[in-house]
Image (spheres, rainbow, N blue to C red):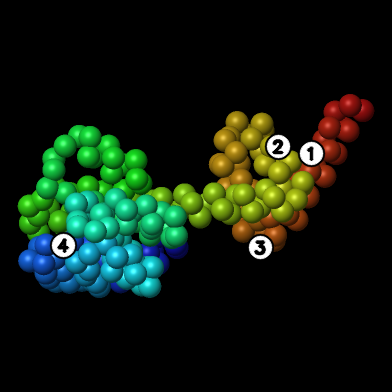
């Protein structure tokens, strides 16, 4: 359901590059492909537009006068969860490693043409969606486990019983609660009571 909603939503792209011609070209290509596009020719405006509109993806030129693309990326990481990919004229493995270190979901080498740009954007958006889903699942998992002792213990029981990781055990518990249309904490409480009853029966 969540992925379907992601696919149906009009995706928005912010392009930040000091090359005005390239900026206009990339905006035109992505608008034609159906994306909503914003443009900025410097890092400062790029940060402002990103935080104002929260686009689905930001394309950042690494080397810009003033605030560089790396500095923009650092700000976005600290102040938002907006995904970004880098543009660079340098096809250098060290630059690629640096981009990955900053958390980029993609990297594109200039000069850029539409046959490279659109597949790279689609791949970056898909990776960003995967990361967002993992982050959402982790938030749900943490919130549920922090909510009470019963949930945490029930997850532990499922881990041992079915040889699951903590994350998969929580998903199993969540699926059971959805199937029964009950709160996770209530399902967990019942599971603990059943487990304790089984332990007592085994000792008897």
The residue identified by callout 1 is 195
| Relative depth, front residue between 27 and 180 | 27
The residue identified by callout 3 is 181
The residue identified by callout 4 is 18
| Relative depth, front residue between 58 and 34 | 58
| Relative depth, front residue between 93 and 130 | 93
Tags 4 and 2 touching, CB below 8 Å: no
Disc number lying in front (2 or 1): 2
Report if residue 116 is visible in the image.
Answer: yes
Cα–Cα gap, marks 2 and 3: 21 Å
Tags 3 and 1 touching, CB below 8 Å: no
Q: Which residue occupies 84% across, 32% down?
A: 199
Q: Earlier in the sequence, mark 1 or mark 4?
A: 4
Q: Earlier in the sequence, mark 2 or mark 3?
A: 2
Q: Earlier in the sequence, mark 4 or mark 2?
A: 4
Disc number lying in front (1 or 4): 4
Task: Residue 125: name its quadrant.
Answer: bottom left
Pinpoint residue 61: horizontal percent, then vertical percent: 20, 55
Q: Which residue occupies 62% across, 49% down?
A: 142
Disc number lying in front (4 or 2): 4
Q: Which mark is residue 157?
A: 2
Q: Residues within 10 Å of mark 4 (few under 14, many from 20)?
A: some
Q: How many marks?
A: 4
Q: Which residue occupies 30% across, 61% down?
A: 57
**Location of the C terminus (image quadrant):** top right
Q: Horizontally, is 91 left or right of 10 in the view?
A: left
């Amino acid at each position: 359901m969540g992925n379907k909603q992601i696919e149906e939503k009009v995706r928005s792209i912010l392009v930040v590059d000091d090359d005005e011609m390239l900026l206009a070209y990339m905006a035109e290509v992505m608008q034609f492909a159906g994306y909503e596009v914003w443009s900025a020719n410097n890092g400062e405006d790029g940060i402002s537009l990103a935080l104002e509109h929260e686009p689905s993806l930001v394309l950042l030129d690494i080397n810009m006068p003033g605030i560089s693309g790396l500095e923009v990326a650092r700000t976005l990481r600290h102040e938002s969860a907006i995904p970004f990919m880098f543009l660079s004229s340098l096809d250098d493995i060290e630059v690629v490693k640096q981009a990955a270190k900053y958390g980029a979901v993609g990297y594109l080498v200039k000069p850029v043409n539409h046959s490279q740009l659109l597949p790279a954007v689609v791949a970056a958006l898909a990776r960003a969606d995967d990361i967002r889903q993992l982050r959402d699942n982790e938030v749900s998992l943490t919130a549920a486990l922090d909510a009470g002792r019963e949930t945490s213990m029930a997850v532990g029981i499922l881990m041992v019983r079915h040889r699951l990781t903590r994350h998969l055990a929580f998903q199993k518990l969540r699926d059971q609660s959805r199937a029964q249309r009950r709160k996770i904490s209530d399902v967990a409480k019942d599971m603990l009571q059943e487990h304790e009853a089984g332990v007592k029966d085994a000792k008897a």
